[in-house]
Image (cartoon, rainbow, N blue to C red):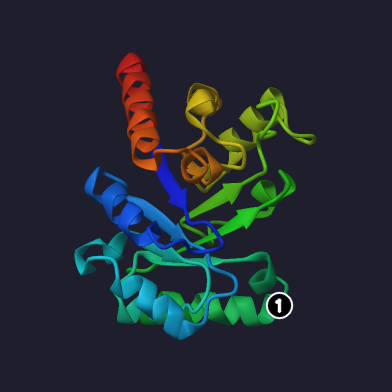
């Protein structure tokens, strides 16, 4: 199961240092989501991370930087998807010019899974869990999630309210991975929490094997 970390929308002084530490401890995919960040600011952010980790980064904006920095891929946001013709052309050009770059997006309803037709390398689905109760949010339940994930032609990543406490639930439902935000960044020691999640996933994997 993929373990993905997404950045906070606002940048702290120690953020890129923490991201680098996460990479050093095995993080395979990092989603860089900074809605208010300019192109130059994103360049500075990327430059502050060792170049050999750039191929693990997926950016949500300023997609033109993906090739220049040898990034893993780009993420199409809800705003990108509003423009269907432009989005179709964007996807076509990306795949033609940069065949090694992955393309991801987010679904906010289960209907998105059924309508998807293999355009994306994986998709984020959420918000799955309520951050306070840690139960499923309205619109999601065990039966509907299992059915949708089983029929999906694309790997589905659980998003929203994910933490070390619900790794087992996501694993049993059949998610291909989990993306962590508050479950990492709102912890006093993000690196320790990340290592805890990795250990939990490894334990579940060994049990299934």
Q: Quadrant of the N terminus?
A: top left
- Residue pushed farthest left? 52
**In the rendered image, the vertical position of residue 93 relative to residue 136, given as above or below:** below
Of the 4 image quadrants, the one containing the C terminus is top left
Residue that sits furthest to the right in the current view = 138
Q: Looking at the picture, how far across and down is residue 101, in whole percent?
A: 37, 69
Q: Residue at x 32, y 33 (%)?
A: 195
Q: What residue is shown at x 62% (from left), y 76% (from top)? A: 87
Q: Please give left or right for residue 53 compared with residue 130 in the image.
A: left
The residue under the point 68% across, 71% down is 79
Q: Residues within 10 Å of mark 1 (few under 14, many from 20)?
A: few
Q: Residue furthest top?
A: 207
**Please, what secondary structure does the residue beneath circle 1 have?**
loop
Q: Based on the displayed image, in which of its 4 quarters is residue 161 positioned?
A: top right
- Compared with 165, 194 (above or below) is below
Q: Residue at x 33, y 20 (%)?
A: 203
The residue to which callout 1 is attached is 83
**Frontmost residue, 109 versus 163:** 163
Q: At which x and y percent is residue 68? A: 32, 82
Q: Is residue 168 above or below residue 152?
A: above
Out of 110 and 29, give the one closest to the viewer.
29
Describe residue 201's horizontal placement relative to residue 128 as left or right.
left
Q: Residue 27's spot in the image, x, y percent?
A: 31, 47
From this view, report whether residue 65 is shown above or below residue 100.
below
Numbered-mark total: 1
Residue 113, position as x, y percentages in the image:
65, 47
Position of residue 71 in the picture relative to residue 149 (left or right): left
């Amino acid at each position: 199961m993929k373990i993905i970390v997404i950045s906070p929308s606002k940048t702290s002084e120690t953020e890129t240092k923490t991201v680098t530490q996460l990479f050093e401890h095995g993080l395979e995919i990092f989603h860089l989501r900074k809605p208010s960040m300019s192109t130059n600011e994103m360049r500075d952010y990327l430059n502050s991370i060792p170049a050999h980790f750039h191929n693990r980064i997926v950016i949500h904006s300023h997609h033109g930087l993906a090739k220049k920095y040898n990034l893993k891929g780009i993420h199409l946001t809800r705003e990108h998807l509003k423009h269907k013709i432009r989005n179709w052309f964007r996807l076509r050009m990306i795949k033609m010019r940069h065949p090694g770059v992955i393309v991801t997006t987010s679904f906010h309803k289960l209907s998105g899974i059924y309508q998807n037709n293999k355009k994306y390398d994986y998709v984020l689905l959420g918000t799955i869990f309520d951050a306070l109760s840690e139960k499923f949010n309205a619109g999601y339940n065990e039966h509907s999630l299992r059915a949708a994930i089983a029929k999906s032609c694309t790997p589905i990543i659980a998003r929203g309210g994910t933490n070390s406490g619900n790794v087992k639930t996501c694993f049993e439902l059949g998610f291909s991975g989990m993306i962590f935000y508050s479950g990492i960044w709102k912890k006093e020691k993000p690196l320790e929490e990340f290592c805890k999640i990795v250990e939990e996933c490894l334990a579940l994997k060994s049990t299934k094997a």
